[in-house]
Amino acid sequence: MDVIPAVDIRGGRCVRLTQGDYARETVFEDDPVAAGRRWAELGARRIHVVDLDGAKDGHPVNDALVRAIASGVQCPVQTGGGIRTLEAFRGMVAGGLDRIAMGTAAVKDRALLRAVVDEAAERLIVSVDARDGRVSLEGWTEATDLDAIEFIRELSELGVQRIVFTDISRDGVAGSPNFEAYSRITSETAMHVIAAGGVSRVEDLRALNDCGVEGAIIGRALYTGDIDLREALEVTA
């Protein structure tokens, strides 16, 4: 299982939000590129970069910083936030990003989703962000009645190979991931699943591994020191 450090960018800085609330922001680094480089130097095999401004505004905002992180490390970098056109997707591929995540567009623009699947399914990640089992959009600010598990099944039928599943209520807070949801997704679908939200101790990684996910994104716990990246990499090797 991959342990994937997160670099969330807002206003040009590395931050974490609490439960997806833009009003509850903690700044951890002034230089997101330096943060990405540090995680890579500590042994990260992949880094997850989110353009939070882009997710909220609907188009890439911090894309220069995202590309700078990708070019400044040796490991693959995946990104998301505001990728809602085929041109934006292609721009990230051209900018050196290994995988590109789409969230809102995957729900609202199925023609675009099909076009991306046809062109580069192996590089696409769909971000499935759920609150109380229902999909949220627009940088987690818009609730829907779309059942997350049913949506994931539909994505699989459309040819999507990989998702990042985030339980928003667990994101950026001390606690544990939604293990039940991850076990259900991996057992009921053929999707490759990356877990995000609520990973706050090494034991969570062991439990996620048992759930069958292929990776776990860690944010706040790495920046606070509650999880040591080297130890996390060792226990999941």
Image: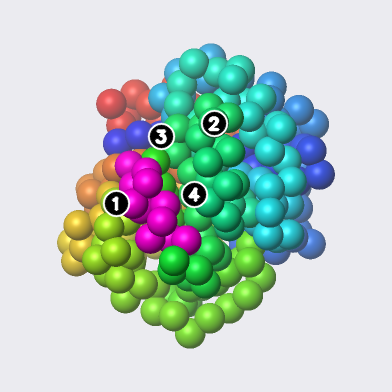
> Which residue is situated farthest in the bottom direction here?
145
Amino acid type shown at disc 1: Gln
Q: Nearer the viewer, mark 2 or mark 1?
A: 2
Whether residue 228 is visible to the viewer of this picture, yes or no, is no
Q: Residue at x 45, y 32 (%)?
A: 98
Check residue 134 for magenta coloring: no
- Compared across the picture, whether 187 is left or right of 77 comes to left
Where residue 3 is drawn, which disc sits there? 3
Q: Nearer the viewer, mark 4 or mark 3?
A: 4
Q: Nearer the viewer, mark 4 or mark 2?
A: 2
Q: Residue at x 23, y 49 (%)?
A: 212
Closer to the camera in the image, 221 or 52: 52
Rendering coords of residue 228 (x, y %): 50, 28
- Compared across the picture, whether 24 is left or right of 154 comes to right
Q: Earlier in the sequence, mark 4 or mark 2?
A: 2
Tell me which corner region of the image, top left, top right, bottom left or bottom right, holds residue 139: bottom right
Calculate the distance from the C-alpha at mark 4 to the C-alpha at mark 1: 12 Å
Amino acid type shown at disc 2: Ala
**In the image, residue 147 above or below residue 4:** below
Stretch in magenta: 112-122
Write down the residue under mark 2: 94
Where residue 101 is drawn, which disc sits there? 4
